[in-house]
């Protein structure tokens, strides 16, 4: 077993297909996530990764309305540990990565694009895609849709206050 870092977030074993690329490379490899938590992803790889490697993970089955790791399109992650799973010559490894940022778009590691975090879900959003509420909270497209579906009244006022950080 790898030397697990103490976990603050419960993990769920839920296999999902992903593509990933190591930062500074535009080549994507296909693999699958074995389990995940709000803070990290554990996935299979066909080569050894080094701690601190920056990895961009793209969900094949992006489903913004579902709970679980596929609620975001992509993640920027940093490798925390990696280990060989079977003896050579099999190239079969497993790696644990910490989530640095999530997005409803495909994140480009160290990209030039100007991004902001959505005030509701924390996802990184390209500036041009941010949607503003009446009180000037900045939301991603997905949260803005949910926000607009809230009926006018007490709840929408509470949500608005929460978003602009003015909780009374
Ligand atoms: Zn959002």
Image: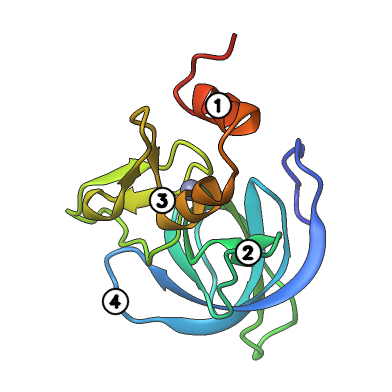
**Which of the numbered marks, if any, corresponds to residue 26?**
4
Q: Earlier in the sequence, mark 3 or mark 2?
A: 2
Q: Which residue was labeled with disc 1?
A: 157
Q: Are marks 3 and 2 in contact (CB under 8 Å)?
A: no
| Residue beneath the point at 24% across and 48% down | 127
Q: Residues within 10 Å of mark 3 (few under 14, many from 20)?
A: many
- Residue 65 disc label: 2
For marks 3 and 1 on the same chain, the one whose residue lies earlier in the sequence: 3
| x then y, percent, for residue 28 | 40, 81
**How would you rate the neighbour count of disc 4 (Cα within 10 Å): few for under 14, some for 14-19, many for 20 or more?**
few
Left or right: where 57 falls relative to 39: left
Q: How many marks?
A: 4
Q: Rounded to the nearest whole Å, what is the CA distance between mark 4 and mark 3?
A: 25 Å
**Spatial CA span between label 4 and label 2:** 28 Å
Q: Is mark 3 within 8 Å of ligand 1?
A: yes
Say whether residue 95 is visible: no
The reply to whether residue 161 is visible in this rendering is yes
Pick whichever, 50 or 21, lies toward us. Answer: 21
Q: Which mark is residue 140?
A: 3
Q: Earlier in the sequence, mark 4 or mark 2?
A: 4
Question: Where's residue 164, x and y in %?
Answer: 44, 23
Dot 4 lies on which element?
loop
User: Few, some or many C-alpha atoms within 10 Å of disc 1 (few <14, some 14-19, many ≥20)?
Assistant: some
Relative to residue 137, is residue 44 drawn left or right? right
Is 64 or 150 nearer to us in this picture?
Answer: 150
Q: Residue furthest bottom?
A: 89
Left or right: 100 in relation to 124: right
């Amino acid at each position: 077993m790898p030397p697990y870092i103490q976990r603050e977030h419960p993990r769920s074993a839920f296999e999902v297909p992903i593509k990933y690329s190591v930062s500074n490379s535009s080549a994507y490899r296909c693999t699958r996530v074995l389990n995940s938590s709000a803070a990290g992803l554990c996935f299979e790889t066909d080569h050894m990764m080094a701690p601190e490697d920056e990895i961009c993970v793209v969900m094949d089955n992006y489903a913004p309305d579902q709970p679980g790791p596929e609620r975001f399109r992509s993640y920027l992650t940093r490798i925390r540990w990696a280990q060989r799973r079977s003896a050579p010559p099999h190239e079969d490894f497993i790696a644990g990565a910490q989530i640095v940022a999530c997005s409803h778009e495909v994140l480009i590691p160290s990209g030039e694009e100007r991004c902001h975090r959505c005030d509701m879900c924390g996802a990184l959003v390209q500036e041009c895609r941010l949607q503003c509420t009446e009180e000037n909270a900045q939301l991603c497209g997905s949260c803005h849709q949910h926000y607009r579906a809230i009926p006018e009244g007490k709840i929408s006022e509470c949500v608005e206050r929460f978003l602009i950080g003015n909780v009374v």
